[in-house]
Image: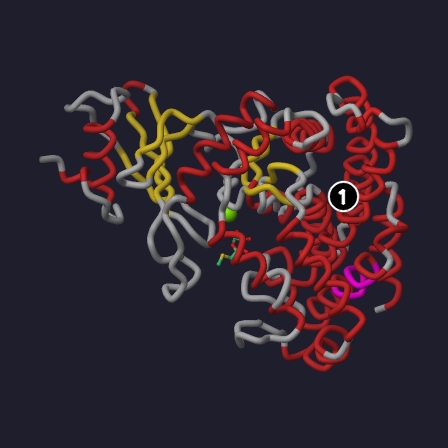
């Protein structure tokens, strides 16, 4: 019997080589393979498998029962199935913008996917102040096509409910409910990581601010109950591969039906982390590109949303005049709010971002963290006033001027 008929974590590179030979028709039994673990996320193991002689390569991604970020955290390995299935679906909605999936193995909780190692992880490229002229165009097509297409306005509500059954994702949603929408405001599980230089600021601005707690409590319950669209669920710059020409969005294991502003807000916040790093290191040209890209992302999303809505709306009541604009205004308010929660959780929560943590100068790092928090609070507390790209970048620049 094959050793791969019972789940175990393939930590050994020889296991991976044997696995792909046995379980795929891509490599012959005598192929000479090189295997390298290239995973960079908090959850899974990712291997690059290459057969140099035949110029073939694939990626194997396996879900472990314990998370990489913390051995105490155990979540269902079914997340890998969710990821493989949603990527196949998204490839229909947004062709060319997600990696190709070659197969999924329910026993080993492993998926085989297209090798994208010619791309760079966007977070690291931004940390080197690289710019990507097509990014706003690509990410807005991806978001409009995957998010709006899975709402009740466009999709047949019965088909949508069938999809909802497939993408119920309680354990990964719980991670977000805890790490993004609870702990940053009270440290109730004692897992926050607060830079000592800003501990007084965090106490005052986050832990003691009751009005903020109420606003975030409302957001948490919106996240848990508003099954608006099929989200990526963790759409940060570590879930995006880029080249100067192309963009691929991957790693949608947190996918579920939720408020679409959560995805859009994550993009905005992660662009702001890149800006903050550039600002700390005096990279003016790069910072201007980030601001322009944020504005283009919001404005193009609005434009493409209304076009897509007009062309594809099916629900009779959703065709009512001004409904699309009303729906979009709510999405923009959610975008501002969830950009705020992402900025805050990556600054004081358990899972932080290298854009900020690697700012070497203590004072500059503290300043970046304070900008994140002040900008976030403005976006959460005044979310309904956020409509255009400039509204978002003005909030960031205003926070920068206050610190
Ligand atoms: C315990 S997992 C921590 C974070 O990593 C993932 O990428 C998600 O962002 C999650 O919140
Ligand atoms: Mg991830």
The N terminus - image quarter = top left
Query: Which residue sits at x=72%, y=82%?
Result: 200
Q: Residue 63 location in percent, x, y?
A: 36, 46
Question: In the rendered view, does 55 fall on the left or right side of 237?
Answer: left
Is residue 223 highlighted in magenta? Answer: no
Residue 156, above or below 327: above
Query: Which residue sits at x=66%, y=59%?
Result: 220
Question: In the rendered view, does 88 fall on the left or right side of 217?
Answer: left
**Residue nearer the viewer, 9 or 394:** 9
**What range is drawn magenta here?**
373-378
Which residue position is annotated with label 1? Answer: 290
- Main secondary structure type of the part rendered in magenta: helix
**Residue nearer the viewer, 153 or 216:** 153
Residue 97, above or below 8: above
Q: Residue 403 location in percent, x, y?
A: 84, 69
- For the question of whether residue 340 can be seen, the reply is yes
Question: In the rendered view, does 254 fall on the left or right side of 219?
Answer: left
Q: Residue 126 location in percent, x, y?
A: 64, 45
The colour mode here is: secondary structure
**Residue nearer the viewer, 173 or 342:** 173
- For the question of whether residue 281 can be seen, the reply is no
Secondary-structure class at tag 1: helix
Residue 396, above or below 4: below
Where, by quadrant of the figure, is residue 79 drawn?
A: top left
Where, by quadrant of the figure, is residue 203 drawn?
A: bottom right
Query: Which residue sits at x=35%, y=31%?
Result: 104
Q: Residue 75 location in percent, x, y?
A: 40, 55
- The crowd level at tag 1 (other Cα within 10 Å; few <14, some 14-19, many 20+) is many
């Amino acid at each position: 019997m094959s050793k791969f008929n019972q789940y175990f974590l393939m930590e050994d590179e020889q296991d991976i080589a044997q696995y792909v030979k046995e379980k795929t028709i891509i490599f012959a039994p005598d192929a000479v393979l090189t295997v390298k673990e290239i995973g960079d996320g908090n959850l899974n193991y990712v291997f690059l498998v290459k057969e140099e002689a035949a110029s073939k390569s694939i990626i194997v991604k396996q879900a472990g029962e314990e998370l990489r970020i913390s051995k105490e955290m155990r979540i269902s390995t079914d997340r890998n199935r969710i990821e493989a299935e949603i990527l196949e679906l998204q490839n229909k909605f947004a062709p060319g913008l997600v990696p190709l999936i070659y197969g999924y193995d329910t026993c080993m909780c492993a998926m085989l996917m297209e090798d994208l190692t010619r791309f760079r992880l966007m977070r690291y490229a931004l940390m080197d102040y690289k710019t990507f002229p097509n990014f706003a165009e690509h990410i807005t097509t991806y978001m409009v096509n995957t998010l709006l297409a899975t709402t009740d306005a466009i999709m047949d509500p019965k088909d949508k409910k069938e999809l909802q059954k497939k993408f119920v994702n309680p354990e990964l949603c719980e991670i977000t409910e805890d790490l993004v929408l609870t702990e940053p405001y009270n440290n109730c599980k004692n897992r926050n990581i607060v830079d000592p230089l800003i501990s007084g600021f965090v106490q005052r601005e986050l832990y003691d601010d009751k009005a903020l707690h109420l606003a975030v409590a409302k957001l948490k319950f919106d996240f848990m109950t508003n099954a608006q669209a099929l989200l990526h669920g963790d759409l940060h710059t570590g879930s995006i591969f880029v080249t100067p020409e192309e963009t691929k969005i991957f790693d949608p294991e947190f996918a579920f039906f939720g408020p679409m502003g959560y995805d859009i807000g994550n993009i905005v916040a992660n662009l702001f982390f890149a800006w903050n790093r550039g600002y700390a290191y005096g990279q003016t040209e790069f910072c201007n590109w980030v601001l322009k890209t944020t504005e283009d992302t919001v404005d193009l999303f609005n434009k493409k949303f209304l076009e897509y809505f007009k062309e594809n709306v099916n629900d009779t009541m959703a065709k009512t005049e001004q409904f699309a604009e009303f729906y979009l205004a709510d999405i923009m308010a959610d975008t501002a709010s969830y950009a705020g929660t992402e900025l805050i959780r990556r600054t004081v929560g358990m899972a932080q971002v290298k854009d900020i943590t690697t700012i070497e100068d203590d004072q500059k790092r503290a300043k970046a963290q304070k900008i994140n928090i002040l900008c976030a609070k403005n976006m959460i507390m005044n979310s309904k006033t956020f409509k255009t790209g400039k509204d978002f970048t003005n909030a960031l620049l205003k926070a920068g001027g206050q610190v």
